[in-house]
Image: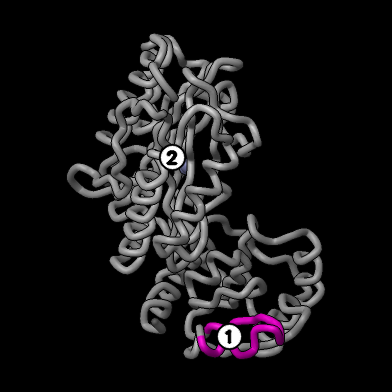
Amino acid sequence: MPEVHARRRAQAWARALDACPEATALLVTSLANVRYLTGFTGSNGVLLLSEDAALLGTDGRYAVQVVEQSPDLSVHLDRATLPAVTSVWHSGGGGVLAVESEHLSVSDLRALERVIGASPRETTGVVEACRMHKDASEIALIDRACTISDEALQAILPRIHAGVTEREVARWLEAQIFALGADELSFETIVAAGPNSAKPHHEPSPRPVEEGEFLLIDFGAAVGGYHADETRTFVIGEPADWQREIHAVVARAQEAGRATARADADLRSVDAAARSVIAEAGYAEFFDHGLGHGVGIEIHEAPFLGPRATGRLPAGSPVTIEPGIYLPGRGGVRIEDTILVAEGPSRSLTTSPRDLVVLG
Ligand code: ZN
Ligand code: ZN
């Protein structure tokens, strides 16, 4: 898709100039940003982007792949990729170099300064801002990843009952995700039983889930480099009153978050819409993370929804809405969907039932 990437590079360059008007080039060192702007997926890549040129650097391992994936670009191969590419640019006239300050190590910065004999200008979030709004082809991949995630979850639910372990559930779900055509997992599957469900990022263990416990499953498929992110919380056997209550509060908060997440909504106000439901129910202190995040080439990317977020939701941006209540030692509930922000009501790309489902 060379035209798509050329269009993205033009947009990114315009944003780079907004951030740093005197720049004559932007050195892109985030692999996700390199992929977005070039289509190249190797594990070593840097892009020197300027008004009328783009130079992609990698090393000899990717000599064939880089030509296949980025046939429209000039490529420079060198094991010391970053200083080598910068040196090519510098000796060709150079100028004022802008860098991605969040994606450059101190040692790479020093190497770069030795090449250009000056300190580069720092920018943050230039390409990430372009990536927030997804085009139709990107949305189609995320939609597919979300559909696979929903179908995989529904396929394994009948196998879950008291006595199965967190790890078994994770492996079943992952196998199903691949069987349905995913390229990779979005991230390491979280399956948390009983008190473990109160730890938002629990790793699946050999612990079996018991009768009367929560089972929280946070997972996702990835297709064509694009991710899905979904969480559902179940109960094994008859739920207790406290379990029904916190699940209902989280479900209401999640619905409020989804309803508020429209194009141009203030990021903080979306978080607040969900958080206030949890606070009014008396559980404010048990919801200790942001409401959601963008989903795309990376599983966590801009925009980030939280109490201290700044900015607005762009139309065409897939984001998660994932409130939770976590009661230490007892258990927790999180309900998470990947939704697509639109001018009118947002559309949820993950669609598994959100009411409290009893398993076993
Ligand atoms: Zn998740
Ligand atoms: Zn998430």
Q: Is residue 79 above or below residue 260?
A: below
The residue that label 1 is drawn on is: 65
Report the magenta residues as a range: 54-68
Whether residue 156 sits left or right of residue 202 in the image: it is left
Q: Foreground residue, 161 or 304?
A: 161
Mark 1 against mark 2, which lies toward the viewer?
A: 2
Ligand 1 within 8 angstroms of badge 2 C-beta = no
Image coordinates for residue 170, horizontal then vertical, percent: 54, 44
Image coordinates for residue 273, horizontal then vertical, percent: 33, 26
Query: Residue at the spot x=41%, y=44% of the render?
Result: 156
Dot 2 alpha-carbon crowd within 10 angstroms: few under 14, some 14 to 19, many 20 or more? few
The residue that label 2 is drawn on is: 159
Q: Amino acid at mark 1?
A: Gln
Dot 1 alpha-carbon crowd within 10 angstroms: few under 14, some 14 to 19, many 20 or more? some
Whether residue 176 sits left or right of residue 133 in the image: it is right
In reply to whether residue 62 is colored magenta, the answer given is: yes
Q: Amino acid at mark 2?
A: Arg
The CA span between labels 1 and 2 is 42 Å
Query: Residue at the spot x=47%, y=60% of the render?
Result: 178
